Each structure stands twice: as structure tokens, then as C-alpha cells.
Amino acid sequence: MAFTDTSDNLLSTFHACKMGSLKELLKSKIITMLQEVNPPGRWKHLVVDQYALELLNSCCKMSDILSENVTVVEGLMNKRPQTDKEAIYFISNTITSINALISDFDKKPIYRGAYVYCIASVSDASMRKIKQSNALSYLRSFKELNIDFVATDAHCFSLEVPDTWFTVFNPEAPSLLTYELSTMAKRIASVMGTMGEYPHIRYFSRPALFSTAAQKSVTSELAFLVQNELDLMCRTNPDFPPPSDFKRPILIILDRSVDVLAPLLHEFSYESMIADLIQLRDGKYKDEEGKDVNLDESDQIWEQTKTWHIAKVLEFLPEELRRFTADNEAARYELGNTRGNTTTDKLDGLRGAVGAMGQYTDIKAKIARHTNLCQRLMSIYNARSLDRLSALEQNLVMTDPAENSSRFLSEVTKMLEDESIEHMDKVRLLLLAIVSREGVSDKERQRLFDSFRVGTDVQALNNLGTLQVRLSSNIDKRKPDTRNPYSLGANCARSRGTQFEFENSRYTPTLKYIVEDQLRGNLDTHWFPWIKEPPQETINTPTETTTQRKKPTWASKKRGTPSTETPAVTDRRANGPRIIVFCVGGISHSESVALSKLGDTLNRDIILGSTHLWEPDTFVEGLKSLHRTGSTASVFLDYQRPVKREPRSQRSRYDDERPDSRSSGRGDRYDRQDDRRYDRQDDRRYDDRRSDRQDDRRSDRRPEARSRYEDESRQEDRRPDRREREPRRQGSTREDRGARSSPTYDQDRSPMPRSRPSQSRREDANVDAMRNMNMGDQPEEKPKRSWFSFKK
């Protein structure tokens, strides 16, 4: 059995995918893994865990896997029959997956042999456990691929760890933050190893007042950890970095506090609009019948139009249909536009139509799908009055805070009072109004709160202070920092005088300005210091002559052999070093679209990565729960926008009564939350009065006090008993009230933080969740995703 750290075909994989996307790089590594295993019987099984299955689905199709002599793809946690074939284990490095691998060969081996490929590096404790088990005699090979990330797009990747939203911006302990950053650094290094890049690193840092020195922050700590991981990779792997004819790339590490406006705005590019109004997750959306529909590279229309404005897409689809029907033989034959009227011409037309029938059916179905999707988007756009709402949002964020007078405040107030606007859209507008002015006075804030029932969503505004956002001009007497070259005022000054094609898409994400300055060599070193500053001539000018990139001499004495391949003319890295941006705390679809357009415009290679992807509604939900220690991403990951109620003028008087305890209540989450809060408080007060009355009757009170209390109790007893009018609610007894007030029952009223579950409890929860998963025969409902196993 061979134990290796990386794949033997690192160089071949890198050179084969020089110009390929991240998805092609991952797919190439996985296909190479399958081709390396050639058992005597030719056929083999593929065993995957939950995370490996998600990685496979992000870059490969089932036909790609089955074409490599794979008979079946099985789940690691499923019960499998014994077979005489050998299996490929494509698993993550978690303790749960390692224990499942060992148990497969404990007493009765399921397979004749196993070729184990781990997504990331395995700990020394897990390796010792494997060597001491019975599985060692059945392992044919054991390799670490270092592909611990998910390619969400051709030039975008995600670590799929939304739980870091809490552990980074509101950690329970410094040790937990250090652990999360260390794990994140290893995974970022695996991305660099997959791409074969050893980048120069710089990070975002806010200088202290009256100082230009870099300050210690989350991004600085993460940047140094990534540098250490890359240096270690250079020392341990003689083939890293592989020889290249291009300049070393530049990795920029920043966090979500750089721009909090982009995830809140309504963006009207095709991809962003689907993600905001319909929800686009893992490249899928649900149609009107509730079925999942894929949007990937196989759809040429999607690849061409996903970054376009919705207005351009609406113009493109009819033109594409007319062009297609004019060029395709099958379309012309169906419309009766055959060339010639003779029998020979008709037969030739029929022969051409039959040959083009496959393309005709495919393109026709895709055009119909996108047409229906655009109609659905525009119906939601009109129903939610997004034309008026987006115009006000753009006016707020495109006005300098120093010039942003109270003239917009009256417009915001009118919009918040409008009952046709949905509640979540009002919350987003409220956040934008306060953030865009860099704080408002208490009087103005109260005026905004009085415009609509904000309820518990006010916590999202309060938690913005965690992201270095100035919220109040009364509390924070300091003036906004004018030194920041990427503040809202500076961005407005940069965009002044620019002609915009669409008025509802004028805002430019801050990430785009940062990358533009880096491409021009103007990125401020006080706000983005280097870990190891490179020579200026290696990062500013495009590549004019082929300069060989070599391994650093301090890392190893062995030098890589120069590449004999000539660089492709169409490779964007020939125009300058590749720019890689990593954002801690999530990115929005609008930022991904903006950087994709920038790369196409300047013909430069730009890669964007983050811990996870945000949708506007889930970003607000994540802000609401940021103050809760020990929270997990489940509080905002599966958020669904509530169903909107009819205007009050169209409702009957019975609709405004107290909601029935048997109703779902999810659709009326915001409109009825005040009523439910009143019910809970009234239940408590009434129960307390009854319990106090019983205690007082048993006590030895003064006669005058007891008679006065009894007179009051007789007056209260004339009211019908609440428990007779309504069924008993949960928490109506004193025992239930005690459970309700406990820290683990309701975090909103919790006087103390919840304790974080231990490692063993988290692993047990993962095992129970993954054992219910059936890889071969998928159930109708997808199992709930467990994020703890992805942290290892």
C-alpha cells in the first residue's frame, strides 16, 4: 500500500487545464483519480460521504463517472452488501468518515480492496487509527487530493462553511476563532494547490487613528496562516508550485465589513435576480411546480446571459428564437419554410430536418424554459413594486453621506408605510437608509421605526455594529473616517460623471473598485498591506516576455524543470498576474457578477472565493442572529420568505383577530408577531396572578390585607377563565414557564449564552444525519445538511 500526500499527476493536471475553469480543474482531478484505479475485474465501486457527494455534483455528471468503469456510487453511511469487487473511497477527512472506513473492513470486509482518496489532509491521530485497524491489510493506496472546496462557478469557489459567520464575527472564545481560521487557511491553501499557484498575499486592515501601521485583525491573522500553509506545502511537495510561464498571482484577503450594502440591494442581473426573487442554490431553482431545475454550463443561453441585465435578456430571447428558427432545418420544416416545392426539395428538407431534430428539440426547450423564467421574474418584480423600491435604493447608496440630507428620509418613510411593499423589502430598505447615511440621529431612527412594525428585525440593525458600521450620530460623536479610500463617499465620488445604462443598477460593489486598483497597481498599501512585498515590476505591468516562475530557493534546494509548452495566446494570465480575492463572511451574487464582467472587460483572470454565498433575505436573517453565541447556520440557511397577507382594507374583521394556535403561523410571521408576543405576556401575567393568589391564601396574612386581596380576586373571577376559552398553550404552567425562560429554549430572551456542543456530540449528530441518507436511491426530501462535519 502506498501513502502519498498529493496526486502523482499534479503537473499533468495543471498543464491540461491551464485555461480551464475551476470546475474543469476539479473534474480533471476526479477523473484522474478514477482512471488511476484499474482493478483486475475492470469494474469498480465508488463510495462517497455527504461532502464528497456535494463536491462531485458541483463539477461532474453521473455519466462522466460511470464512463470510467464505475458500476455504482454508494453512500459511506449506507448499509451495503458484500461483493468481490474493489472500491474507491472518495471521502472527507472527518473522524466520522474515517471511522466508517475502518468499520467496513472490521469483521466482514465489504470489498476485496480499497483505494482511499481523501479530499483534504488527514490528521496524525486518524492515520494512526487506520494503521492499527484491520482495514490496513485491505488498503491498496491512500492519497490526499487537497481539493477541499466547491466550485460554484467557472471563476468562483466556496468553502461551504456558513457557520464561520458566527465564529469569526462573534466568537465564543479566542481559541475557537483560532481554530476556525487555521482550518480556513488549510482549505484556502488547498485551492491554491489545485490551481498550482503560489501567490503574493495582501490583506485588508483598518489603520488606527493617527497611524498608518497595519493593525491586527481577522484578515491579517488569516493571511499569515495561509502564508505558513503555502510555505509548508513548498517544503513538503517538490512539485509545488509547478513551473509556469506566467507571473505569480496576487491573493487579496478581506472580510464582509468592506461592503455591507451589496448583499442588501436589489440587483437586476439575470443570475442575481433569480437568486433574490426565486432562490438559486447549488445551481438549481424550483419551477412553479416545485421541481428542481439545473442551470449549468450545458445551457448555452444561461452561460451567455447570466451576467446580463434582465432587460437585455428580455430583448435577447425573442431575437435568439427568430435567429434559430431561420437557421435550423427542423425549425424551418416545422414552420413550412422549405426551400423549393418539388418532391426532391421536400425530401432534402425532410432529411435536413431529421438531422437537426436533436438540436432543435434541445434549443427549443431551453428558450421556452428561460422565457417562462423571465416572465415569472417580471411578475414578481411588478407585484412587489420593485421599480419604485429599487429607484429609492439607488438614490440612497449613490449619494454622498455628507450631502445626503433628510430629503430622502421622507421618501423612505412613505415607502415603509406602503402596505403593498413586503416586510423583508422594508427591512432591507431601512438598513440601507441608515447605513448609506453612516448613522442617523435617534429622532430620525425613531421616525423610521414608527413607519412600520419592525419587530425583532431591529436586531439586524443593531448587529451591523459588529461589522464596523456607524449607526448613530448621537452615540458615536466621531465623524466618519474620510481616510478610507473605499468608503461610500469615496465610491460615490469615483462614480460621479459616469453614464449608466440602467438607472436601477448604478451601484458598483466595493470589491470591483478594489480589484480595479490592484490591476492598475494603485491599491493603497496602508489599507491592504503585503505579507511579503514583491517587486513592483512583477505585479503592475502585463507579461511581455516569458519569465520562468520557479520554486523559492529557501523552500527547497531542488529546482523545477522549465516547462517546454508555449503559453496559449488566449490565456488571460498573459495580460498580467491572476487576481484571487477571498472574502471572509460570504459574498453576494451581485459581487460575483461584477467581477466576472470586469474580467471579461479587461481580459484578465479574476477568481473570487468566500466562506459561502449570500442571498439578500438570508443575509438579513444572518444579521438578526449574529448576537447569539453558539448559533449555527441553520437559523438563516433555509430561510423562506413568508407569504404576503392581503392589505388591511381587503381583510375581514375576523382576519385581524388573534391567530389560532393550530395554524402554521409561518406565512404571518411578521404581521402577527406582536399579537403572539402579547399572548405570551398575557399568559404569564394571568398565571402569575393565579399562583400568587394560591400562595397568599395559604400564608398567614393580616386580615385587612387578606380581605382586600379576596375582594380583588372575586372581581377577577368574574372574567371567564382563559384556559376554558382557549386550549392550553405550551408554556402555560409554571414548569413550562421555567423551561421557556431557560437559556436553551429561546435565545432571544436568553440571559446567558448557549453552550457549544462538544466534538463527540457533534460527530454523533453527523452520524445520525448521514446514516439516514441513501446515495443510491435518493429520497424525495433532501436530508438536512450538517455543517459540523465540514469544519474538520
Image (cartoon, rainbow, N blue to C red):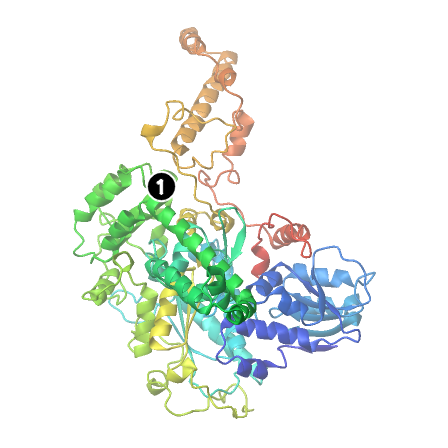
Q: Position of residue 303 (x, y in %)?
A: 45, 66
Q: Position of residue 351 (x, y in %)?
A: 56, 70
The answer to whether residue 415 of the structure is visible from this angle is yes
State how many labels appear: 1
Quadrant of image for the C terminus: bottom right
Furthest toward the front, the residue is 342
Q: Which residue is found at the position 54% from the left and 92% from the top?
A: 561
Residue occupied by mark 1? 423
Relative to 763, 284 lies left or right: left
Q: Which residue is found at the position 67% from the left and 56% from the top?
A: 775
Q: Nearer the viewer, residue 133 or 586?
A: 586
Relative to 475, 348 lies left or right: right
Q: In the displayed structure, would residue 514 be above or below residue 268?
A: below
Q: Position of residue 113 (x, y in %)?
A: 78, 70
Q: Position of residue 608 (x, y in %)?
A: 43, 68
Q: Could you say whether the residue bearing mark 1 is in a helix, strand or loop?
A: helix
